[in-house]
Structure formats: C-alpha cells, structure tokens
Image (cartoon, rainbow, N blue to C red):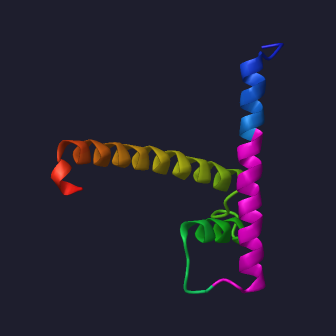
C-alpha cells in the first residue's frame, strides 16, 4: 500500500499510544524493582517477565517487544472475560430480582 487512509493512520497512532503506555508501566516497574522498594516475596507476572528480559542466558531472554505483546494479550483476554462476566451477572440479576 502506497498511501494510508485515515483509518490506518488513526490505527497506527493508537498502537503507538498503547505501546508507549506499556513502556511507561514497564520502566516504572523496573525502577521499583531496581530501587529495592518492591517486596521481594511478591513476584507477579510482570515482574517475572522483566526478570526474563534481564536474564543473562540468551536462550531464555525475552525481548521488550515480547513483553509488550504479552501485556496486550493479557489486557485483551481480561477485558473480554470481565465484560462477559458483568453481562452475565446483569442478566441473572434481571431475571432473579429477589436477589437484589
């Protein structure tokens, strides 16, 4: 494609914005980890991904793009799951008004 239409340009801007937001979150978490402010016993998925990014062995090292892609995947999956759950709860509360 030689020229991008309005939708493609807007899509590119949105993708860049999402990537920037995730990178800010990752940098903030890295600062927290490096400063020692984080509880060492707390290891969430994002901390594990960042640890894998800084892995010495290149066989197990994750790129920053891999981490960004994982964050996008989790966000999308969780958004769909929560939306479905809330829709279902609303339906059930509408059917069973005695529950409220």
Residue 8 drawn in magenta: no
- Residue 3 location (% of width, % of height): 83, 14
For residue 35, which quarter of the picture?
Answer: bottom right
For residue 63, which quarter of the picture?
Answer: bottom right
| The magenta segment | 16-38
The answer to whether residue 20 is left or right of residue 38 is right
- Residue 29 location (% of width, % of height): 71, 70
- Residue 27 location (% of width, % of height): 77, 65
Instruction: Inspect this view and state whether residue 64 appears.
Output: no
- Residue 8 location (% of width, % of height): 74, 22
The answer to whether residue 35 is left or right of residue 77 is right
Q: Main secondary structure of the magenta part?
A: helix
Task: Tell me which residue sits at (19%, 42%) in the image.
Answer: 95
Task: Tell me which residue sits at (78%, 25%) in the image.
Answer: 9
Query: Compared with residue 5, is residue 68 higher up or lower down, i.e. above or below?
Result: below
* Quadrant position of the N terminus in the picture: top right
Task: Tell me which residue sits at (61%, 86%) in the image.
Answer: 39
The answer to whether residue 8 is left or right of residue 100 is right
Instruction: Inspect this view and state whether residue 45 appears.
Output: yes
Residue pushed farthest right? 2
* Quadrant position of the C terminus in the picture: bottom left
Query: Compared with residue 17, is residue 5 higher up or lower down, i.e. above or below?
Result: above
Residue 30 drawn in magenta: yes
Residue pushed farthest top? 2
Query: Compared with residue 31, is residue 78 higher up or lower down, i.e. above or below?
Result: above
């Amino acid at each position: 494609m030689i020229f991008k239409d309005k939708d493609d340009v807007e899509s590119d801007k949105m993708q860049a914005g999402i990537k920037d937001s995730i990178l800010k979150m990752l940098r903030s978490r890295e600062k927290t980890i490096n400063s020692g402010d984080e509880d060492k016993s707390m290891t969430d998925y994002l901390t594990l991904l960042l640890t894998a990014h800084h892995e010495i062995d290149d066989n197990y090292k994750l790129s920053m793009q891999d981490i960004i892609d994982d964050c996008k995947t989790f966000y999308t999956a969780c958004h769909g799951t929560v939306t479905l759950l809330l829709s279902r709860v609303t339906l059930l509360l509408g059917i069973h008004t005695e529950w409220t």
